[in-house]
Image (tube, rainbow, N blue to C red):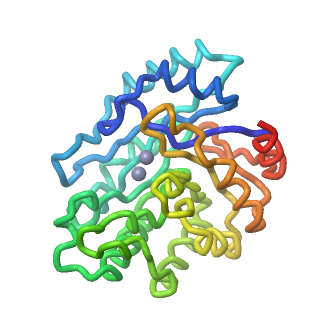
Amino acid sequence: MFKADYHVHSSFSGDSGESLNVIFQHAFDLGLQEIALTDHLDPDFPSERVIFDIDLPSYFQILETYRKEWEGKLSILTGLELGLQQHLAQDLDHVLSDPHLDFIIASIHCADRGDFFDETYFDGKQKDEAHRIYFQSLYENLKIFDGFSVIGHMDFIKRYGKNHYGKDHCELDYNLHMDLIDEILRLAVEKGTGLEVNSSGYRYGLGHAHPDSIILSRYRELGGEIITLGSDAHRAEDIGKDLDRAGELLENLGFRYICGFRKKEPLFYPLARLRVHLAGD
Ligand SMILES: [Zn+2]
Ligand SMILES: [Zn+2]
């Protein structure tokens, strides 16, 4: 009976205005047992549109206060969504080894100093090429970084480039990149890194979570078992959304467990019980 959301943003993130009070109350009202705050830290982000910096000491301190306040009602985990860029390899060691953190999502939100959110990033790139660069960049970063828990929304690049590629922008040709996807997943399994299943894909109308089942199936075939579920909520009302749907998908793909984390160590909870529990709500 494990109900948890492992990808939630608060006003500690540059792109969210949600207060911790509202978030925890909403999570509790939904009947969640655990919530992992995963606010953005994306150092040296190559765009001015938003500041993805965070004051870690105050983040840790405030979460500790809330953790005590909610003890016995809701477990509050201290997480981060850490943006990786290759040139930061040494700079992030202290974050990746910080003992306050229970859980770290490693995400790629930019490549070659370009922000995916900025349409000009796609100038002069064919769609397949842009997708390839994303996977290549993820792979290069995974090779040099350690100490994170899961790979965030692996394949979310398909949400971007709409002005360049039109309505087909979200059609990603997985077969074209399967060699690279395989390398990424093999490395993840070797390092004991999980994948998150990020249910925001449903909210964006893609009809699936990130990553798509083709990647999840391959991860499992390669021996991967560490999976977390997260909504990527930036507003309290999105907390927990479509996680039951994602859990059901995982079960259909043959996964047996869903993970929680404590101090970066995965804990395994049976999926079947998750689905039954959520369906009974
Ligand atoms: Zn992200
Ligand atoms: Zn996020």
**In this rendering, would 186 be left or right of 276?**
left
Q: Judge by depth and name the residue closer to the eye, 242 or 130.
A: 242
Q: Is residue 244 visible?
A: yes
Q: Above or below — where is 54 with respect to 241?
A: above
Measuring from the top left, give residue 77's x and y in whole percent.
57, 32
Q: Judge by depth and name the residue closer to the eye, 34 or 79.
A: 34
Q: Above or below — where is 28 with respect to 142?
A: above
**In this rendering, would 89 be left or right of 229?**
left
For image coordinates 57% across by 46% down, the residue present is: 230
**In this rendering, would 221 be left or right of 279?**
left
Q: Above or below — where is 177 with respect to 13?
A: below
**In this rendering, would 231 be left or right of 114?**
right
Residue 127 placement: quadrant: bottom left
Q: Judge by depth and name the residue closer to the eye, 243 or 1.
A: 243
For image coordinates 33% across by 64% down, the residue present is: 160
Image quarter of the C terminus: top right
Residue situated furthest top in the rendering: 69
Measuring from the top left, give residue 117's x and y in whole percent.
27, 57
For image coordinates 30% across by 73% down, the residue present is: 166
Measuring from the top left, give residue 247's x and y in whole percent.
70, 53
